[in-house]
């Protein structure tokens, strides 16, 4: 499997994903909102927003193992009875 890199992150901007981190944890249903590069440490961060929340947080790119794109149509159901 390839490393998760900037090009993969750019292709997922604005989409909802499950983030699988290198330490084995998973952050579920977040939306990539942007990329940020720190000039001093030369580290790249991904800005994420949790689904249906306004909280934005940053995750270092090097700590992400892979991202699984979600289809929200599977989650959204109508309440027609």
Image (cartoon, rainbow, N blue to C red):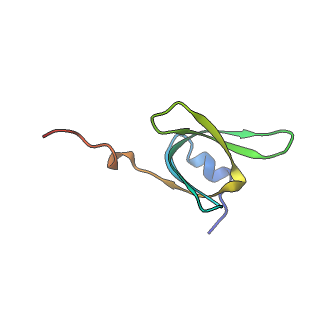
> As drawn, which residue projects farthest toward the top?
54
Q: How many numbered marks appear?
A: 0
> As drawn, which residue projects farthest toward the right?
40
Q: Position of residue 8 (x, y in %)?
A: 62, 53
Q: Position of residue 31 (x, y in %)?
A: 52, 41
Q: Position of residue 23 (x, y in %)?
A: 65, 61
Query: Who's the residue at 85% across and 44% down the image?
Result: 41
Image quadrant where residue 81 sits: top left
Query: Who's the residue at 56% across and 33% down the image?
Result: 55
**Quadrant in the picture for the N terminus:** bottom right
Query: Who's the residue at 20% across and 39% down the image?
Result: 79
Q: Position of residue 6 (x, y in %)?
A: 68, 50
Image quadrant where residue 44 sits: top right
> As drawn, which residue projects farthest toward the left?
81
**Which sits in the foreground, 32 or 58?**
58
Residue 3 lies left or right of residue 72; in this view the side is right
Q: Is residue 47 above or below residue 2?
A: above
Q: Is residue 68 above or below residue 72?
A: below
């Amino acid at each position: 499997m390839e490393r998760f890199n900037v090009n993969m992150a750019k292709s997922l901007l604005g989409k909802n994903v499950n983030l699988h981190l290198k330490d084995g944890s998973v952050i579920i249903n977040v939306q990539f909102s942007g990329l940020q590069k720190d000039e001093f440490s030369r580290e790249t961060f991904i800005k994420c927003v949790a689904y249906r929340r306004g909280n934005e947080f940053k995750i270092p790119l090097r700590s992400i193992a892979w991202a699984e794109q979600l289809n929200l149509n599977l989650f959204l159901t109508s309440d027609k009875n």
